[in-house]
Amino acid sequence: MLSTAANKADLFDGMRAASASALMLLVGCVLQAPDFSWAAIGAFWTSLATARDTPRSRLASMLSFSVLSTLAGGISTWAASLGTASGALAVLCFVTLAGLTRIWGSKPYQVAILAATACVVMVDHPLSANGGSSVYLFLYLVGCLFATALSMAVWRLRPAAPVRHATSLRQAAGDTLRQSLHTLREHASLSSDGVHFALRLGIATTTAYLLVHMLQLPYGYWATMAVLLILQPSMSSTWPRSIERAVGTAIGTLIAVVVSGLAQTPLAIALAVFPLIALTMALRPVGYSVFVAFLTPSFVLVTDFAMPAIDYSYVWARLENNLLGSAIAIAATLTLWPLTDKLRK
């Protein structure tokens, strides 16, 4: 197992994401601005959204994610300030649209589903009920753009294949648009597997959002994120993913408790986040449960940058929400237009 993990691990990718996120937290420490945790989150998610094949596609994926996630998060935050019902409507719209991008393949879906993740996290942010939302949205966008600049100028990713641009940027954009519209026309039907998956994802995630608000569960965005990231086109892929996420989250939250007990100042947290994010990204190719085990403490420590030491009630709340999200995802897979395996990840 260790040999396989070592062969699959991408330390370069881990260092790239860790440096972008940790630097944003260090800036927050210097300026004594805890909201810079949002810049670190933006940098981390932008690193996750990065395409790896060519510099052109890398830049397009990172900038697309930066703009889409900021807009979706801002609109969702504003909608949530009007009430739970309007927040749920925003979640339904953005998540359903993100699910629909699966018809165009894994790369657009990766960008869209991460943008939807930003939406379901920001919609539950405490500032959504007042006028302070624009500050953390601005810092979030700064983090996204910083990670993009760092990846393109310093941590230049190695392309999977030699770069050969036989067409101009304008011609490539036109060809992509025509192909995208053709694919969309093929799926423009309520009988389409792609439409069914998008609706199922949107309905299930919105159900989780409404349920955690009705039950007043703390850290409810972990339930909505679980649905969003677990739910797959078929039960054969959703079920093992839910198990892997539950196990990974349990291990990862315990790691967060231990680390937070040792790192109790913003500077110590910023320094601790670096190796955690580096391992998260480096071990992503190894397996989903390993990825989640390191993703959880990374995300917990970044989002709770100014929070005192995390206790075990916090662990239970996180795990409880993930189990709830997993149950909703499995129920939706079984009841809402059970899909064939035509759409594979």
Image: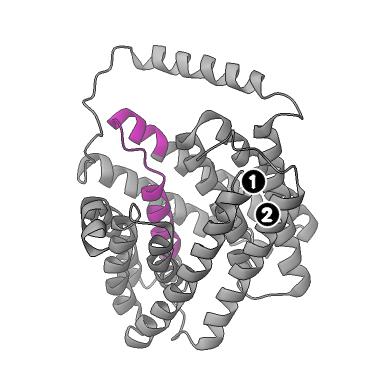
> Over which residues does the magenta segment extend?
37-61
Residue at horizontal 46 percent and vertical 14 percent from the top: 175
- Horizontal arrangement in the rendering, residue 5 relative to residue 59 (left or right): left
Asked which secondary structure carries label 2, the reply is helix
The residue at 66%/68% (across/down) is 324
- Rendered location of residue 34, percent (x, y): 43, 71
Q: Residue at x 37, y 84 (%)?
A: 258
Query: Considering depth in this image, is 267 or 160 the residue closer to the camera?
Result: 160
Q: Which mark is residue 205?
A: 2
* Residue 119 in sight in this render: no
Mark 2 surroundings within 10 Å by alpha-carbon count, few (fewer than 14), some (14 through 19), many (20 or more): many
Q: Is residue 60 above or below residue 254?
A: above
Q: Secondary structure at mark 1?
A: helix
Q: Give the residue pinned by disc 1.
A: 95
What residue sits 58% from the left and 60% below the top? 226
Which quadrant holds the N terminus? bottom left
Q: Amino acid at mark 1?
A: Val
Query: What's the residue type where badge 2 is placed?
Result: Thr
1 or 2: tag closer to the N-terminus: 1
Q: Label 1: how many residues lie within 10 Å, few (<14), some (14-19) or many (20+)? A: many
Q: CA distance from mark 1 to mark 2?
A: 7 Å
Image x and y of residue 168, in percent: 33, 13
* Residue 65 is covered by the magenta coloring: no
